[in-house]
Each structure stands twice: as structure tokens, then as C-alpha cells.
Amino acid sequence: MRIGIQIIYLILVALMMPSRVGAFDHLRVTGILVVVAASILTEWLLYSDSKNVFRLDVLFVFGFIIVHFQWPLMFLSDVKIRHLRIESFIDSVSYGTWLSALGLIAWFIGWGSFKFEKKRKFRILSVEYEKLKWAFYMCFALFLLFAGKDYLTGAVYRGDSDSAAASGLGAYFQLLLGFVVITAIAFYLPVAAAKIRKHGRWWQEIDILLLIVLGLYTLMFLAVGDRGGAIEVACALMLIYGMLVHPITKKQFCVLAIVGALVLTIIGLGRSSGSKSGDKNMLSDGVEKLETMDTNSAYILTLELANSSTCLYAAIDNVPTQHSFFYGKLWRGNLLAVVPLSQQIVGGFFEMKPDEMGSGGYITYLFYGDESVVGAGSSIIADLYLNWGEVGVVVFMFGLGVLYKRIHQGVVNRESLMWVVAAGALATVAFYAGRGGYLIFLRPVIWSLVIAKMLTTIEMAPVDNKKSKIKP
């Protein structure tokens, strides 16, 4: 019944297909969005019995809605906010909305198609992850050493420096540090919670040093205006906490979402204020700029994320009328990224340009040409459409829904701490997955699992109590 209802929604949206290029169709877009809303409400109100709201599906769907449906809603609501690039592709908005609706409903069909209910074959006797914690401290120290003054003072985000954010070795250690942090959280929270439930002495399970360094890590990224690291930690932390420690209710989730969106908006405005390092700090700049803007609409809190929809509209405008579908060629960058340094080595050897490696590079080429020093980004539907067309959007979004559900159930079933690591890594990209490439999850999930495999040991026993020591 569950899947049947979603298939009906998919068919209804398919029947409302607009022309690929044409004026914004208010009536058709309204109908599409009504079906999308029905699909979401059906899934969450009728078939979700979890008390915890901070889940992978919620993170993914909320981010997806903002990226692919906020601007169509703003056009329907006649919101007085202008974006010249989106308006220049207004003839593709209706088709982009339709394509996004197909993708989201297909994702829900994938999410609900399999239960993945498995009985636990092993129980955990002990967990050793001391090497993982020291790897975190070491990577943090190396990152601070190599990040550079311009990054640590936030100069690269205020326009005071020509250097890239955490470039060179600093960028490498920042990347590695992020995966180590997520893996450490995935081990610390469940293990500490289990010990507290067993012994009741919560104060003995607090790792003061780990929490202090984790707090400094998060505050540092917020202070310099780099929101990525802070968002990744917050999403992984809240997801694992909500699933394994204590459920996060709808009210708590809404408060977290509003406060988070407001803080990130202030930081984003502070970054773009152009204030020099000798003036006010970034947060003060952001607050001041927010006060001078027309904030009558809540849309402004997520406008930066929503602007990524222009990537989809540009893709529809370009393919297949001016360029044929790429059939997976624009996935080369994400696939190579799984192996350290392979992008630079392979790309350099074959003299591949950025617009040949990924959809973000290709869309940047469409907007700015060959010599651009900034990136336009992408969206998950744009990435699938450029590579595989409309059918690919439905098929691959269905597959992604299945993947998300498998990882979610791995945690729910308490199958292994490796599923917790995978869920934490996926949580770091789930909210922003809507504005990234389809395979954006590959590197964080695979690297985090490899780190856990190398730096931790879990002692387990089968359900028949026959003891066995294995690597996770």
C-alpha cells in the first residue's frame, strides 16, 4: 500500500509534464507541488512511527525541498526577491520543478521499498578507540599548523586575501580531520550512552579532552566563517544522538533548524559584507547586514541554498539542445575522489578540464567560461539529468532512497558500529546533498569506514555467547 500510493503520486506528476522550455506555468507548478506535499505527508504522517525526527530522510528531504522547490514557491507567492540568473532561466523553471518532483517521489519509493529488518548476530563486549581519539587531536594540530594565518583569521572569507581557503596541506588535513571527527563521534556517543545506561554514572563517561577539542573545532569554523565543518559536526552529532541516545522531538528539531538557519545566515552575510579584518568581526557584520535587509519573509534564511536551483535550470537549457547527455562522464571526479590524490594525478595525466570531471565544473563553464576562479556548484537533479536524462533521474533517485534506508536500518537494528559510522558520514552531506553531485556521499562514507577499520577494535560475541574478537 505504501509503495502503491507513492507510485500513484509519481504517475500523477508524470502526467503533468510541462514543455521543456516555456513560460512559468503557475497552474501546472501548483499542481506538481501539491502532489509533492501529499507524497511527503503520506510518508511522514502515515508510515513513520519514529519518535526521533532528526533522521537521514528528514535531513535529505528538507535540503532537497529548499534547493529544488523554494524558488518555484517564491514565484507562486510573488515574493519580492530578485535573482537575475534564475530569472534569465525562467523558461526552464516549470520543467525543472517537474523533474525534481519525479526525483523526490522516486527517492521515497526507494526509501519505503525495503524494510531491511535483521536480527542481531553479535553483541558488543568492548570497544577500543583510543587511537582514533589521538588521530583526531593530531589532525587538528596539523590543520592549525598548515591552515595559514589568512584562513584562521577569516581573511579569505572577508576578501582580505588572495589565497584559497585552507589550501595546500591545510586543505588535505582539513578534509582528513572532518572524517576523523565524524568517526570519533560515531564511536564515542553510542559507547558512552551504553555505559551510562548500564552503570548510571554519567559523569564518569564524559571524555573532557575529546569534548573540549571538539568544541574548539566547531567554534573555530564558525569564527572564521567556514560553515561546512560546523554543519558537518552538528548534523552527525544530532543524528547519532537522536537515533541512539535520546529521540529529538518535532519541537526540538524545529528550534534547532530555525536557530541553525539564522546563525548560518548571519555568518554568510558577514562573509559577504566586505568588511576588513581591522573592522568589526564577522558575526557583528552579519547581524548588522541582516537588520538592514527586508526580512519579512522566512525565505531569506535559506535563500543561499535555494539559489543552487539555477544549476538545474541551466542544465535543462543546455542539454540536450546544445550538448548530448554525458552518460556518466561527469561522475569521474566523484569516483576518483575516493582514492587520495587520484583526481590530480589522473586529471593531469589525461589533461582533463574541470568541466569534464563533474557537473559542477560543467555548469561553472556554462556560467563563467574556461578561466573561472569561482565555482557555480550543482544540484543532485542537475547532475543526474546531465548524465542520464529524465529516466536516470527516476532510477538513480530510487537507488539513493534504498541506500539511505539501508544505512538508517543498520543503525536502528543495532547491527554494527560500522553502520553508525556510515550514518554519521552520510549525515554530513545529507542536508546539502540537494545541491551537490549524486555521488557526493562516496568519499565521506568510504573514508570514514576505512578510518574506523584502521583505528578501532571491537570485541564481540555471537548471540550464543561464543566469544570472538574481530575488527569492525
Image (cartoon, helix red, strand yellow):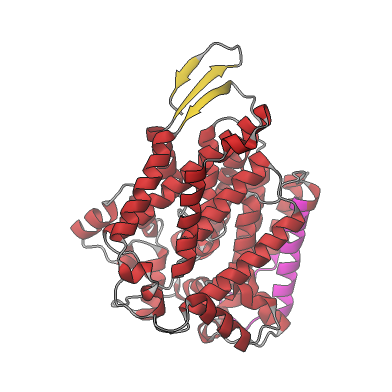
- Does 21 appear in magenta? yes
- Closer to us: 350 or 136: 136
The x and y percentages for residue 6 are 72, 52
Residue at 59% from the left image edge and 21% from the top image edge: 121
Q: Which quarter of the figure has residue 446?
A: top left
Would residue 394 be found to the left or right of residue 470 on screen?
A: right
The x and y percentages for residue 146 are 28, 59
Residue at 45% from the left image edge and 75% from the top image edge: 318
Q: Which quadrant would the N terminus be assigned to in this image?
A: top right
Residue at 31% from the left image edge and 69% from the top image edge: 149
Would residue 78 be found to the left or right of residue 220 on screen?
A: right
Would you say residue 396 is visible in this rendering? Answer: no
Would residue 220 be found to the left or right of residue 258 on screen?
A: left
Q: How many marks?
A: 0
Would you say residue 432 is visible in this rendering? Answer: yes
Q: Residue furthest left?
A: 349
Residue at 50% from the left image edge and 78% from the top image edge: 270
Q: Which quarter of the figure has residue 297?
A: bottom right
- Does 425 appear in magenta? no
The x and y percentages for residue 257 are 66, 63
- Closer to us: 235 or 373: 235
Q: Which quarter of the figure has residue 466?
A: top right
Q: Main secondary structure of the magenta part?
A: helix
Bounds of the magenta segment: 15-44
Up/down of 343 relative to 148, above or below: above
Up/down of 339 relative to 152, above or below: above
The x and y percentages for residue 148 are 30, 65
Would residue 185 be found to the left or right of residue 279 on screen?
A: right
Q: Residue furthest right?
A: 46
